[in-house]
Amino acid sequence: MLKRDRYQIVSYITIMGMEVCWLYTWLDFFNQKTISAAVATLPLLLFYPLAFISSLLLQRLSWHKTILDILHWVIWAVLALLFVKLLLYPALAPFDSLLIKEIGQAFIQIFRAFQPELFILFSSIPLWWFGQRMSHAEANFPLAVSEFQFGIALMAGALFVASQVEITIAGSTAVIITFACCGLLGLAIAHAREGKSWLSGISRGNWQVLLFVSIVLVILIGLLISFLVTPDVVQVLLNILKWIGNLITRILNFLANLLPGEETVAPIEEIPGGGEIINDTIDEISKHFLSDTARNVSKVAFGTGMFIAIMLALWRISSQIVSWLRHRTRGTGVTETRSLSGAFRDDIRNFLRRIWQKLLRLHSLFPVKSNFKAVSPEIATVHQIYHQLLQWAERKGYPRQVAQTPHELLLVLTHAIPETQNDLTLVTNLYTSIRYGASLPTEEELAQMKQSWENIKRGENK
């Protein structure tokens, strides 16, 4: 039990480390772009662990969820004011009214100039929300995979956007290495906690050493490449490739001249500096017909296309590596793997679905008169309990797919969590009979469904 708790703590730390890495890249980018790095970015990252700890402590209270959320964001407001004072006005008293006055002036001038006070407040909101979200999540293997996938895309996007506008992310090399270490270690530990990998086997000691040695080798090789591959080395390699291309062109021209033709054409002598003349002519023509804005847009479009092509290539290569590893470990009896095909697509779909549900909830605040009958309280209760069950399954790492029926989801959940089979079956059967039937649930059925849902939640808290 002690080792399991230790692995769970490490899983939380690694997943939080991945999120902090890509959050830092975007915060540092906006810090340099909006306020010219007037505020240090690293101290703002403290909002993430503080939100995580605050949410964990508040969960111990047996109060209503709405009250706990309000209290959680009241704590954020106090800490945000404290950070504004410490980072921008260290000489002021803790409760000086000038601090509130400066923040109010910053909001008034928001459309003319973005002040550092607003950057601290606005940047702390996503950090605080992500910390609260992690306190309610379970550090399992699906969450580690999704965070690793999202983190790679978001970090690469931040670095790409920064390179396009000529902004250098401070400590980008260290951030990338930290993200890679957290990702590799987090995926291994999270998979081990399921009892299906080498960390839970009889040779876990040897494999742990192999894991850490592999991480160290990856880091050392990355640093060696960063030191060796300099702009001068890249230029030399490009010159070699150009020389090889010219050599191939001359060979092809020589072979083409050996073939007989109907008429002899005098060879065209190469004009010294002809290439520069043609390039200058093309530049003059493009400047004449294309404006500066059009040229900048074309450069950005070309760079974006190259970035997407590289990301797709990396994604394809990683998928082939995973398939090869799955093929190599199949049938060995040492490692059990499961397919994650389409996991990134499912994560994006679930994220968009949650946004749509939030919009529907906002729409429900403004009711519109309708000729349809209102749903009965009994049916509403059944739908509400099953909706909570879907949220519970999503937190466990088993979200309902678009084309998945309730009974297909039931098979997945009972296979993964067999101790809840009876309660899950009762809730699913009653929901489907009400959802697709014409009968109303009885009081006894509602009581059984509520009791089953309570049993499922109690099993989660054990």
Image: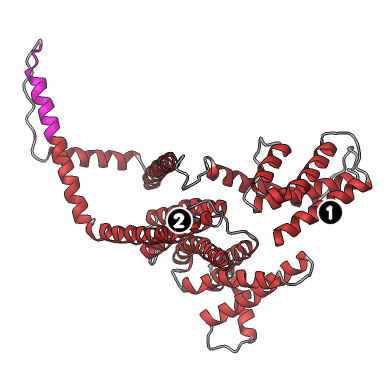
Task: Say what secondary structure mark 2 lies in.
Answer: helix
Task: Give the side of residue 39 with respect to residue 92, left or right.
Answer: left
Q: Which residue is mark 2?
A: 155
Task: Give the side of residue 2 with respect to residue 31, left or right.
Answer: right
Q: Is residue 312 above or below residue 104?
A: above
Q: Which residue is mark 1?
A: 451
Q: Identify the residue at the far front of this view.
A: 202
Query: Which image quarter is the N terminus in?
Result: bottom right
Magenta stretch in the rendered image: 247-261
Query: Which image quarter is the C terminus in?
Result: bottom right
Amino acid found under the numbered disc labelled 1: Gln
Q: Does the CB distance between marks 1 and 2 fall below 8 Å?
A: no
Q: Quadrant of residue 167?
A: bottom left
Amino acid found under the numbered disc labelled 2: Met
Q: Quadrant of residue 168?
A: bottom left
Q: Is residue 175 above or below residue 243?
A: below
Q: Position of residue 76 (x, y in %)?
A: 64, 72
